[in-house]
Amino acid sequence: MIDEKILKKLNLLRKKVLAQYIIYYISIPIITSFLFLFSTYISHTFPFLTIIILYLLIINLVFYSYVKPKFINKYHIEYKKEILAKVSTYLHETILSLSIGISEEELLKTNILPFITQYYSSHLIRGSIDHIPFKSSNVEFFYYHHKDQTLSFKGQWYVFKFNKPFKGITHIYEKNESIYQINKPINLNLYQTEDINFNRRFHVYSNNIEQTNQLLRFHLRERINLLERKYHGKLMFIFNQDYLHIGINNNTSRFTPSLFHKINEIDFMNQIEDFLLIKNIIKYIKTLDKLSNTYLTYIQKAIVS
């Protein structure tokens, strides 16, 4: 449950910022238009005064582009703080908020694309899920190569760092996700699981069949399916070295609620649910390493005896 006091506080702030936003959008264009028309009217009679007014016009436009993000960002920061406090409570982990986002270079290291035409990231958070360090941010990128090879991504990107590297590289894309159509992974082979329904929804590429067999067991597929039900056609997973990248191409920007939408408990729980579903996946991947070590110990003991 979300404390009603938190919702009330955020909605009061939202209304205050919305009022500023409306006044801002009404007053700035009026002032700008007045200054421009007035400078035109007196340009022949008072040229020096015209220059001063034009300077004021420039200052006004700078104010228009600079101040707008300031008061809206204040609202987004407060909203983000309350969301992360609740996420930390549900995960039993500390989640920190940072200003910068995940870098373009980190995404390119996964080889999902040869290059990115435009890139933007924001609202980085950092912490751990089930004691696995991670970071996540809003990410937007655009790829253009030919007219028939364009794609865009807008959503959340997660990067998890495990204690041990994976034995191979595994890419999992939903078939609706267009990245795999444009840039099929080099030196990776198409992999089929024993789950026909999973194969219908996902493309899996791998350079280590043994590793992928171990990863994509029934329990992990079920956990991926739970996330897929919420974000149908919008998921990708990249296992590379000791990193797991998870991309959710849901065309939304986390921690930036609309000023025109009243904040309610559903908004909070929707974001908390994302972290819980992903925690479910991470927790199982951790157990695979333990199972592998247990099995290896068992084999070694059998050989010795």
Image (spheres, rainbow, N blue to C red):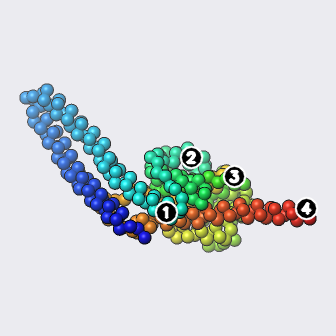
The residue at which mark 1 appears reads as: 89
Q: How many neighbours does mark 1 have within 10 angstroms: few (below 14), some (14-19), or many (20 or more)?
A: few
Relative placement, left or right, of 305 versus 128 is right
Label 2 Cα neighbours within 10 Å, binned few <14 / some 14-19 / many ≥20: few
Give whichever of discs 1 and 2 has the lower sequence position.
Answer: 1
Q: Secondary structure at mark 4?
A: helix
- In this rendering, the label closer to the viewer, 3 or 4: 4
Q: Mark 3 or 4 closer to N-term? A: 3
Work out whether 252 lies above or below 146: below
| Residue at the image position 49 percent from the left and 63 percent from the top | 89
Q: Which quadrant would the C terminus be assigned to in this image?
A: bottom right
Local secondary structure at mark 1: helix
Which residue is denoted by mark 3 in the rendering?
165
Q: Quadrant of residue 224?
A: bottom right
Instruction: Quote the CA–CA distance across marks 3 and 2.
Output: 16 Å
Q: Residue 59 at x, y = what percent? A: 24, 36
| Residue bearing mark 4 | 304
Q: Residues within 10 Å of mark 4 (few under 14, many from 20)?
A: few
Q: Amino acid at mark 1?
A: Thr
- Would you place residue 289 above or below residue 187 in this image? below
Report the front residue among 172 and 138. Answer: 138
Disc with the residue nearer the chain's start (2 vs 4): 2
- The residue labelled by disc 2 is 106
Q: Give the CA distance from mark 1 to mark 2.
A: 29 Å
What amino acid type should be assigned to the residue bearing mark 4? Val
Numbered circles on residues, count: 4
Packing grade of label 3 (10 A; few <14, some 14-19, many >=20) is some
Label 3 sits on a secondary structure element that is: loop
The alpha-carbon separation of the residues under discs 4 and 1 comes to: 47 Å
| Residue 173 percent across, percent down from the top left | 58, 60
